[in-house]
Image (spheres, rainbow, N blue to C red):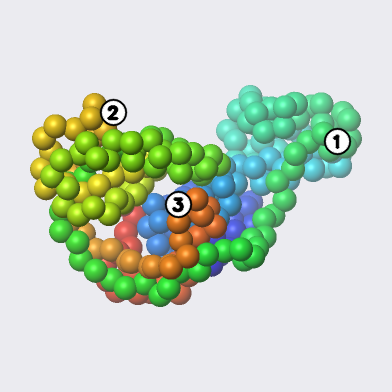
Amino acid sequence: MLAEKVLWAIERNLDRPLTLAELADACGVSHFHLAHAFGQATGLSVMQYVRARRLTEAAESLAAGNAPDILNLALDAGYGSHEAFSRAFRAQFGTTPESVRKAGNLENLTMTKAMKLSQNGKIALQPPRFVSGDRMLVVGLVERHSFGAAQGIPGQWQRFMKHYADIPDKVQPIPLGISANMDDDGNFEYMAAVQVSKVSDMPKELRQWSIPAQHYAVAASSKWRVSLIRRTQTLPPSTSISLRQHGLCSNRQ
């Protein structure tokens, strides 16, 4: 599973600078695919997890009395100053590094331990097939989500379907979901949409997107439905070889 491969790479390299692009290169996939797969599997963005793991290890060092110099600890955790480290520490734990060092314990702190993913209840995907798609014009409802709050997507579909009958010039009746404009913190735009031949009158709540011609990896599951989006497995790491052969791996979204 791709997310497990990324988790292993993060833990192995936690003490050196890491970026989403570097981790994607190490896994042989685009940074967009990596961010999407990791977020679906864990509910966190890649860099949120990296920051939480580093701050957890810093808190453990403070509580154990192994960090007499907080500035050096901040630098080791990837922060350029004591102030930046303290802001991130307080945002993560609700207290200051000095308070944890003084208390000498981790009581009331929510620690982020090295994550291990369970396969129980996962919706498996069939091996992918590779297809070329023409340019698509789509109309749909766009909302912004994060991987920690992706449970809002089924509700977005319900709101979109209220407008579905009012969209003219549909190419085919089957709607489609599109994610785009993802950032390193796991926030992304999601469109519940339908393909149209042209854009004429449409409900004011909807937007239009033009998707250029490109190649796709298509992996199907007979058990999938939108309410199970967080339980759906991503393509296995071995698929990355086929993705590169079909021109589907790049560092661009």
Instruction: Look at label 1 and name its amino acid.
Output: Glu
**Tag 2: residue type?**
Glu
Secondary structure beneath label 2: loop
Q: How many numbered discs?
A: 3
Which class describes the residues within 10 Å of circle 2: few (<14), some (14-19), or many (20+)? few
Q: Kindly indicate the quadrant of the structure image that contains residue 52.
A: top right
How far apart are labels 1 and 2 at the CA level? 47 Å
Other-residue count near label 3 (Cα within 10 Å), few / some / many at <14 / 14–19 / ≥20: some
Compared across the picture, whether 27 is left or right of 96 comes to left
Q: Earlier in the sequence, mark 1 or mark 3?
A: 1
Between circles 1 and 3, the one closer to the viewer is: 3
Within 10 Å of disc 1 (Cα), the crowding (few <14, some 14-19, many 20+) is: few
Do callouts 1 and 3 mark residues in contact (Cβ within 8 Å)?
no
Residue carrying label 1: 107
Q: Residue at x 39, y 68 (%)?
A: 220
The residue indicated by pointer 2 is: 205
Q: Which mark is residue 226?
A: 3
For marks 2 and 3, the one nearer the N-term is: 2
Q: Is residue 241 above or below residue 100?
A: below
Frontmost of labels 1 and 2 is: 2
Residue at point 23% right, 30% down? 203
Q: Position of residue 51 (x, y in %)?
A: 61, 42
Q: Position of residue 226 (x, y in %)?
A: 45, 52
Determine contact: label 1, label 2, CB under 8 Å: no
- Marks 2 and 3, Cα distance to the nearest angstrom? 21 Å
Q: What amino acid is at disc 3?
A: Val
